[in-house]
Amino acid sequence: MERVLASTGKIQAADSRFETSLDIPNGGVLWALPALIANGLLRHIEKYFSLPNGFYSAIHIFLLLGYIALCRIKTIEQLRYEPAGEWGKLLGLDRIPEVKTLRDKVEILADREKVGLWSGVLSKEWMEGDPEAAGVLYVDGHIRVYHGSQTKLPRRYIARQRLCLRGMTDYWVNDRNGNPFFVISTPFTTGLLDMLKQEIMPRLIRDIPQQPTEAELEANAYLYRFIVIFDREGYSPEFFACMWSELRIACLTYHKYPREDWPEWEFRECLVKMSYGNEVKMHLAERGIKLSNGLWVREIRKLTETGHQTSVLSTDYISDMAIIGGHMFSRWSQENFFKYMVENYNIDGLIDYETASVDETKKVVNPAYRKLEGQIKSKAGKLGRKLAEFGEITLKGDLKSKEIEDYENRKGTLKETIDLLNRDLAAIKEHRKQTPRHISLAELSETDKFKQLAPNRKQLIDTIKMIAYRAETALAVVLRDCMARTDDSRSLLREIFTTEADLIPNEEDGTLTVRLHHLTNHSSDKAAVFLAEYLNASETYYPGTNLRLIYKLVSDLNPPGQEF
């Protein structure tokens, strides 16, 4: 009767009720539930989200989205090919919603203002949970290519494909271990520096915990609030000076214009601590240099085995150069994060086909200016080729009068062409001077105007994927303590999440046992047992029930004398 009332909207939602079930596909994903809860999957959802009366509650929807993310079901549409009843058992329900129903529920939940508030609160809590890691931040842009026809997004250069394609740019902020804090999406191509000034820095100053007080900053002229690390796109002496003098934020990036190599005798071997605590030997050297705007910064170089020198600039005037080197050369953690999220969590995937309006006061590149630049490049290329051809035509040896005449004709023809190209090039350059490089979006013609991809559902799904990634990372860190090959921890977790499991509720004892089936080998089973002990110590209750989760590995198939 309760199920009937819920399905007809007479009560708020159906309750989660578990029955003994065997061999549930993907049942191992419940081993991630304590980590999902600890990382905030269900935190504050009653404050920011609500659904109308029906069979499924907001808790059910959030749990389902977290489960499918960990099981590498990359889009909601892929649930069409999954057993709805088996997935429902993992939620304590008869079945999971159909794809259309789930999309409707997500659309109701994806209120832009509420999703932004929820993700912002979670980001701040993640920072407060690890203030030391939040003091060293990586910022980088990741481009989501758009191949659709709903709108003509501006083109931008995709380094991994070496092409200029239409898309959106997502600016991610990660801690020093590569864990994400938040992401800001934009359809504009103003670049990393503009995004740092306008969006990212104000938010970081507001949210990062344990920053020095104004009195402490005044007492120590070299003390900084936190460190922001980015690639060469953010290289700007003016930006470095602004961040230091006005905000006391230390910047760390690669030197975009390094000078001649330093002598090798300046380098010394240092033990550099990288992310996750591993230590690496590097040959480092340091000098102080003055940038073009008069700002003094530290230049630290790393000497590789091949003799190449990598130059790094920093306005961190306190830390040892080995610490700065560790921060800069651990930046691969964010690059690995992008690669892993694209391959496993489909962060580039299109959530829906909707578009949304953008701020028409924003400046964009003038299409007329871009067209003139293209013409200038084309003319300059032709001029260069003609000049090269003109220089190659020379007189050699004794020549007949006809050969001299041909030489003069060819030279004359080329000279006329070169003069014409020079006049055309000068005219186009003059026209370019009179054409504004940037104009507001409102000034664009109707054919050139564009909209952004609707951010609501994308932001909600991305936040849940961030939670899933952080949960997986937390479990991977636990598994590293018992695995000989620590790099295999995530592979083992992916296997656990997609392995069959048995659900055994016990209402009298108030427990729900999740009994995982055997994994591919004995060492994986041992690691799973180690993880189960850690999870059981958390004493996690299944959301919406009074059942405490107990994690076990099946023991009836173990070899004699090996009981788990």
Image (cartoon, grey):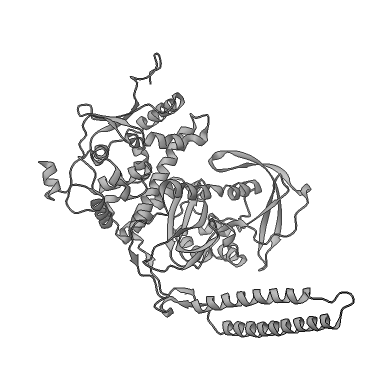
**In the image shown, does 95 or 392 lie closer to the viewer?**
392
State the residue lying farthest toward the right: 398
The quadrant of the image that shows the N terminus is top left
Question: Against 10, is 406 above or below?
Answer: below
**Can residue 65 be spotted in the picture?**
yes
Q: Write the residue at 14% across / 47% down.
A: 7
The spot of residue 4 in percent (x, y) is 11, 44
In the depicted structure, whether residue 523 falls above or below residue 397: above
Q: Residue at x 27, y 57 (%)?
A: 107
Which residue lies most toward the left here? 1
Answer with left or right where residue 400 lies relative to residue 157.
Answer: right
Q: Nearer the viewer, residue 132 or 556?
A: 556
Residue at position x 63%, y 77% in the image: 379
Instruction: Residue at the far top: name it.
Output: 561
Image x and y of residue 196, in percent: 50, 62
- Say above or below: 274 vs 189: above
- Image x and y of residue 495, in percent: 41, 35
The number of discs equals: 0
Q: Does the image show residue 366?
A: no
Q: Quadrant of residue 528?
A: top left
Return the x and y of residue 469 as percentages of the image width and height. Answer: 42, 45
Q: Answer left or right for 161 relative to 69.
A: right
**Quadrant in which the C terminus is drawn:** top left
Q: Could you tell whether 196 is left or right of 45 in the image?
A: right
Q: State the image quarter where residue 456 is shown.
A: bottom left
Query: Viewer-proximal residue, 450 or 363?
Result: 450
